Image: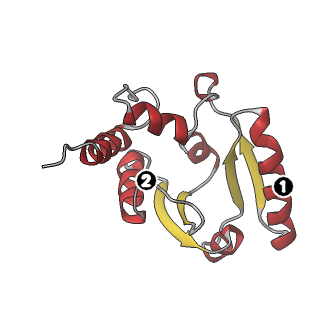
Amino acid sequence: MQRAAKLFDRVIVAVAVNEAKKPLFTLEERLAMVRASIQSVPKAKADWFDGLLVDYVQKQGGQAIIRGLRAVSDFEFEFQLALMNRKLNKDIETIFMMPKDTYTFLSSRIVKEIARLGGDVNCFVPEPVRRGLSTKFRKQEAPCP
């Protein structure tokens, strides 16, 4: 997101509503963490959408979707998604960005598992996300009365 802000006049971190997934945090919690995490970037804002991403981007007057590629294993899925989005709206480009090499192995599943087991995730996520994970897992692991 910080690197994308160097390339574009504005960047929207769009949180998707996806009924097929069972996220750890509610939409409101995810939005709050994103907003707190990006507050130091003046060009960035957080929002949510339900439906097709290309429709949301068009409604926002956007021109591009930025997607991260951590490893070769991400490429096939992301490539298919980019081609489908191009078929749905030829005016919206997909741009792939590579993470720092220190983050190529990360996934939300791994970070959540480390946090659930009491491990330190400080170097993997922004502070608002670390606090959210800590609170969420502390609540889930509270002893029964």
Is disc 1 placed on a helix, strand or loop? helix
Q: Residue at x 65, y 69 (%)?
A: 57
**Left or right: 50 in relation to 123:** right
Q: Is residue 107 above or below residue 43?
A: above
Which amino acid, by three-letter code, is at mark 2? Leu
Furthest residue toward top: 102
The image quarter in which residue 115 lies: top left
Of the numbered discs 1 and 2, the one sitting upstream in the chain is: 2
**Residue 27, position in %: x, y?**
42, 64
Q: Position of residue 130 (x, y in %)?
A: 35, 38
Q: Which residue in the protein does label 2 denote? A: 24
The residue nearer to you, when weighing 11 against 141, is: 141
Identify which residue, 28 or 137, lies in the foreground.
137
52 horizontally vs 73: left or right: left
The numbered mark at residue 80 is 1
- Residue 143, by quadrant, is top left
For label 2, the crowd category at 10 Å Cα-Cα, with few meaning under 14, some 14 to 19 and many 20 or more, is few
Colouring convention used in this rendered image of the protein: secondary structure
